[in-house]
């Protein structure tokens, strides 16, 4: 049994080295969830709103497959592949964290909503609901229509992966629009 499993793994490595599409897909399927959990465990909880393990893993595999195709990696065993993917994941997680704690992006610099937005914690009065709707319309102005659906889904507590699947778009597109929405909301709140 152990010898058979070893042969299956070696066949996977051989296929990966031949850049066989099936092997590439199997490598992603085999490692992506484990690497996402590894990355998530190394992300400071204050940064959870900025990026997650899945964001890191997408970047890990983009880098890995590009560099492997360019011949930068010479992989002979399952253990070597695993060690390489773990190393890239840890490096990418640290890079993401540094990026989100640098200067203006620093999560520690984030502020709570101003006190005049306290109405969000209560049942809104009609005039409060209208004011909020006007703010949302200003934030969404000029953005693709799906930005409004993404904002609504995030307010419902849906993850970026769930939104991407429901809207039939890439998770990266959802992440990009969420980042843009976040920046616009901050601009609006900072000027009030």
Image (cartoon, rainbow, N blue to C red):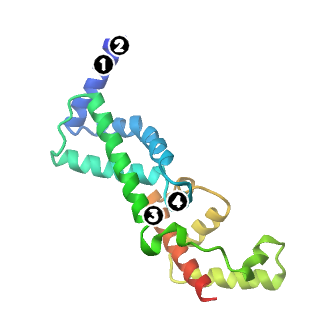
Residue denoted by label 1: 6
Image quadrant for the N terminus? Answer: top left
Q: Which label lies toward us, 3 or 4?
A: 4
Q: Callout 4: 10 Å neighbours few (<14), some, many (20+)?
A: some
Q: Is residue 99 left or right of residue 167?
A: left
User: Considering the numbered disc 2 on the image, is that residue within a helix, a strand or a loop?
Assistant: helix
Q: Is residue 77 left or right of residue 48?
A: left
Measure the C-alpha gap from mark 3 to mark 2: 42 Å
Measure the C-alpha gap from mark 2 to mark 4: 41 Å
Q: Callout 3: 10 Å neighbours few (<14), some, many (20+)?
A: few
Horizontal and vertical percent position of residue 111: 61, 74
Q: Residue at x 26, y 24 (%)?
A: 10
In the orientation shown, which residue stands out farthest toward the left?
71
Image quadrant for the C terminus? Answer: bottom right
Residue denoted by label 3: 173
Image disc number at residue 47: 4
Horizontal and vertical percent position of residue 132: 71, 81
User: Sequence-wise, which precedes: disc 3 or disc 2?
Assistant: 2
Q: Look at the numbered discs 2 and 1 and tell me whether their residues touch, using CB distance below 8 Å.
A: yes
Q: Nearer the viewer, residue 26 or 106?
A: 106
Measure the C-alpha gap from mark 2 to mark 1: 6 Å
User: Considering the numbered disc 4 on the image, is that residue within a helix, a strand or a loop?
Assistant: helix
Q: Residue at x 21, y 34 (%)?
A: 75
Horizontal and vertical percent position of residue 95: 37, 58
Residue denoted by label 2: 2
- In the rendered view, tell whether residue 82 sits above or below residue 152: above
User: Sequence-wise, which precedes: disc 1 or disc 3?
Assistant: 1
Q: Nearer the viewer, residue 139 or 88?
A: 88
């Amino acid at each position: 049994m152990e010898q058979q499993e070893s042969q299956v793994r070696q066949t996977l490595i051989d296929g990966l080295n031949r850049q066989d599409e099936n092997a590439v897909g199997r490598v992603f399927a085999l490692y992506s969830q484990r690497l996402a959990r590894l990355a998530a465990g190394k992300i400071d909880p204050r940064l959870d709103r900025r990026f997650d393990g899945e964001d890191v893993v997408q970047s890990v595999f983009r880098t890995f497959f590009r560099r492997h195709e360019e011949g930068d990696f010479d992989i002979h065993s399952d253990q070597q592949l695993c060690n390489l993917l773990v190393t890239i994941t840890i490096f990418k997680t640290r890079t993401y964290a540094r990026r989100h704690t640098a200067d203006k992006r620093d999560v520690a610099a984030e502020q709570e909503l101003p006190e005049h937005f306290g109405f969000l914690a209560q049942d809104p009065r009609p005039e409060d609901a209208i004011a909020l709707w006007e703010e949302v319309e200003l934030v969404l102005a000029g953005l693709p229509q799906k930005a409004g659906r993404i904002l609504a889904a995030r307010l419902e507590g849906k993850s970026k992966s769930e939104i991407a699947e429901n809207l039939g778009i890439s998770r990266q597109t959802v992440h990009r629009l969420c980042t843009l929405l976040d920046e616009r909301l901050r601009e609006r709140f900072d000027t009030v």
